[in-house]
Image: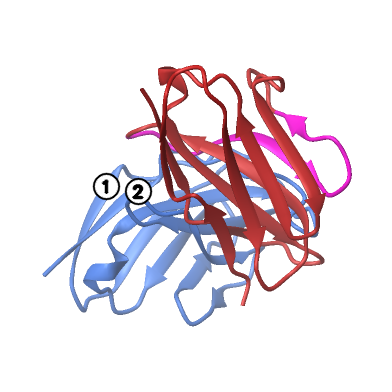
Chain colours: A blue, B red
Amino acid sequence: DAKTTQPTSMDCAEGRAANLPCNHSTISGNEYVYWYRQIHSQGPQYIIHGLKNNETNEMASLIITEDRKSSTLILPHATLRDTAVYYCISRPYSGGGADGLTFGKGTHLIIQP
Amino acid sequence: GAVVSQHPSRVICKSGTSVKIECRSLDFQATTMFWYRQFPKQSLMLMATSNEGSKATYEQGVEKDKFLINHASLTLSTLTVTSAHPEDSSFYICSAGRVRQETQYFGPGTRLLVL
């Protein structure tokens, strides 16, 4: 899996958009970008994934640069419940979730009231 | 949909005893289940991958005779920590892969404390 780099921590005001960057400059053509988050003392939660097109779902938007070397996860209206560690993972598509995930240190996002 | 449960959520045991943790996919069939371990202030580390009806594949450095994994059905995998020691105290999390879907769904975790 390609290595990803994320800031250690970020703050964001409640109600504002939280933009979490991820650098994956060595990503290969068949590798997707996945985002998971882990709220304290809970199991990780899937957020979104994409290959090269921007993606949006009910939780977030994923913006991938044209060269695919970096991406940004956007939480449009952050709430206090969005405080968590956010993990950006790049890996090949494996079908049926057949491969385990390699978690880095992630970004600790703190939403301020 | 796509709910994964773990039982127990928390367990305290004496050194030398064995502890079994169950992981269930409640509303889907999981072709593959994974077990992770997370020490305080650290990230999740993959321990092993299990496929229904076959032997688990362990990551380097994980003792297969100490961490016994059974995946008897498409909805249940168990992890048994045998002869537990204080250094095995950790947060154990399972996840399940869904047929023809790329995402994994994680359980809520089991916090193990070995005294």
Q: Please report the residue visible at 47 percent of the width from the left and 24 percent of the height from the top.
A: B88
Dot 1 and dot 2 within a common chain: yes
Q: CA distance from mark 1 to mark 2?
A: 5 Å
* Amino acid residing under circle 2: Thr
Read off the residue under disc 1.
Answer: A9
Q: Is residue B45 above or below residue A46?
A: above
Pointer 2 local density, CA inside 10 Å: few below 14, some 14–19, many at least 20: many
* Amino acid residing under circle 1: Ser
Q: How many marks?
A: 2
Q: Please report the residue visible at 54 percent of the width from the left and 62 percent of the height from the top.
A: A65
Magenta stretch: includes residue B52 = yes
> Which part of the image, by quadrant, shows the C terminus of chain B?
top left
> Which part of the image, by quadrant, shows the N terminus of chain B?
bottom right
Q: Please report the residue visible at 34 percent of the width from the left and 64 percent of the height from the top.
A: A19
| Residue A29 seen by the camera | no
Q: Please report the residue visible at 21 percent of the width from the left and 79 percent of the height from the top.
A: A15
Q: Residue A43, percent across and down?
A: 46, 54
Q: Is residue B76 left or right of residue A47?
A: right
Query: Residue lying furthest bottom in this view?
Result: A58
Q: Earlier in the sequence, mark 1 or mark 2?
A: 1
Q: Residue B26, percent across and down?
A: 65, 68
The span shown in magenta is B41-58
Q: Nearer the viewer, residue A93 or B59?
A: B59
Pointer 1 local density, CA inside 10 Å: few below 14, some 14–19, many at least 20: few
Per the rendering, the mark at residue A107 is 2
Q: Is residue A86 above or below residue A8?
A: below
Element under label 1? strand
Disc 1 + disc 2, Cβ < 8 Å: yes
Which chain's residue wears label 1? Answer: A
Q: Is residue A23 left or right of residue A84?
A: right
